[in-house]
Image (spheres, grey):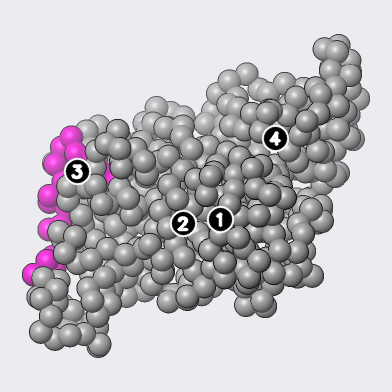
Amino acid sequence: MTLDQIKIEKPANSTWVKKYNSKLVSADDAVKVIKSGDKLIVQPGCAAPLELIKAMVKRKDELSDVEIYHILVVGELPYMKPGMEKHFKHKAFFIGSNSRNAVNEGRAEFIPIFLSEVTMLFKRGVLQADVALIHVSPPDEHGFCSYGIDVGNIKTPTEKAKCVIAQVNKQMPRGLGNSFIHINKIDFIVEADEPLMELPQIDPNATPEELEVYDKIGKHISELIEDGSTLQMGIGAIPDAVLKYLHNKNDLGVHTEMFSDGLVDLVESGIVNGEKKTLHPGKLVAGFVLGTKKSFRFIDNNPIFEFHPQEYVNDPFIISQNNKMVAINSAIEVDLTGQVCSDSIGTKFFSGIGGQVDFIRGAAHSEGGKPIIALPSATKDLKYSKITSILKPGAGVVTSRGDVHYVVTEYGVAYLFGKTIQERARALIEISHPAFRDELTEFAKKTYYI
């Protein structure tokens, strides 16, 4: 198939059209360029180029020690299966459910890093990419393809890669902003016409009790959000629960690493319009989309969106230029001094640093900003308190006690900024689960926290 068959509006005699057609190959032929020992960067999230990944894995017996770098990918990762580690070694900037076992069993590796600095590793030459596997929209009349639903984590590394293989998919939406790559910069093109992977924000396995907890947390957070605020929403059920309580707000903006389904209704209703933003007014700034067709269709050629590389979106100094910046991020546990663990359960790695610290610090330096850490007060079986006397042995401190301002559970809001250890301990015990308050109080007294 040539571009003539997949695109109606095109300059028939354009040089780039000829180049496009000359670069067309099958997925199997495209990945033959990958050699043992190569380092690969893969477009992540719902934008993962699965056809290219499958074709590469079919060559496993010809390959050894291929290093694969990316943030989390949605969907099956065949190179993560047991026994694949001699062929492919994944090095994760963020751990998803499909890579967690591999990391904790030593079959893959984890790189703890702020999301704002992931792409800088490639820009500064700390990491080299021999091959970039990307997933883009068909080209426009000028030969530019859009990185679509994931610009932030892939554009900069791709620009530094020695070889670029692009899966060009008619179903990839055209995200606008700093989000394009020209046909001239692509070495091999593999055409596709297939649905993108999807990631609903609400856990389908969540119990009614869990949903009630998320709902209460969302309501508490919504009460902290003023008209004219600019929002960053992290991943998960809690940020999504916040959105349902924002329909009485006015003139909200968005500057976020991730856009998801829950924001679509707020934009369509005019609640999110960006009119009061002090940076990129009238624009919704994001790095990538994790969601479903609802989001994918909404961003397609939508001029309210500006997608940018993550080193820009997540730069705390850029974030802080948004007045009334509200950053909402979740955690695994918070100790009585305010230390936040978000990436591990004890010594077992669970996710990653991601953009939490970027946005917590950016919001903290915003005029009228509010950095928020939100979590349920306890595990769903009530076996453990998530407001803890001390973090579990081996747990990582992602957000330091000096960075924390607001901590929210279903029992209320604790404001810790400028507070003593004694004041922090009392405030956190007040929003802990009642089943653990006596235990936490006893520990606090023994340690002279109160």
Residue 160: in sight, yes or no? yes
Left or right position of 334 against 82: right
At 22% across and 33% down in the image, what residue appears? 65
Seen in the picture, residue 215 relative to 21 is either above or below; the reply is above
Q: Quadrant of residue 66?
A: top left
C-alpha separation, residue under disc 4 versus residue under disc 1: 19 Å
Local secondary structure at mark 4:
loop
Q: Quadrant of residue 282?
A: bottom right
Q: Is residue 443 magenta?
A: no
Seen in the picture, residue 241 relative to 119 is either above or below; the reply is below
At 75% across and 41% down in the image, what residue appears? 406
- Residue 287, numbered circle: 2
Nearer-N-terminus badge (4/1):
1
Quadrant of the image for the C terminus? top right
Foreground of the two, 198 or 228? 228
Q: Amino acid type of disc 1?
A: Thr
Q: Amino acid type of disc 2?
A: Gly
Magenta-drawn segment? 21-41
The residue to which callout 3 is attached is 130
Quadrant of the image for the N terminus? bottom left
Label 1 Cα neighbours within 10 Å, binned few <14 / some 14-19 / many ≥20: many
Q: How far from the left and from the top, in percent, is residue 72?
A: 44, 47
Seen in the picture, residue 148 relative to 123 is either above or below; the reply is below
At 27% across and 63% down in the image, what residue appears? 181
Nearer-N-terminus badge (3/2):
3
The residue to which callout 4 is attached is 404
Nearer-N-terminus badge (1/3):
3
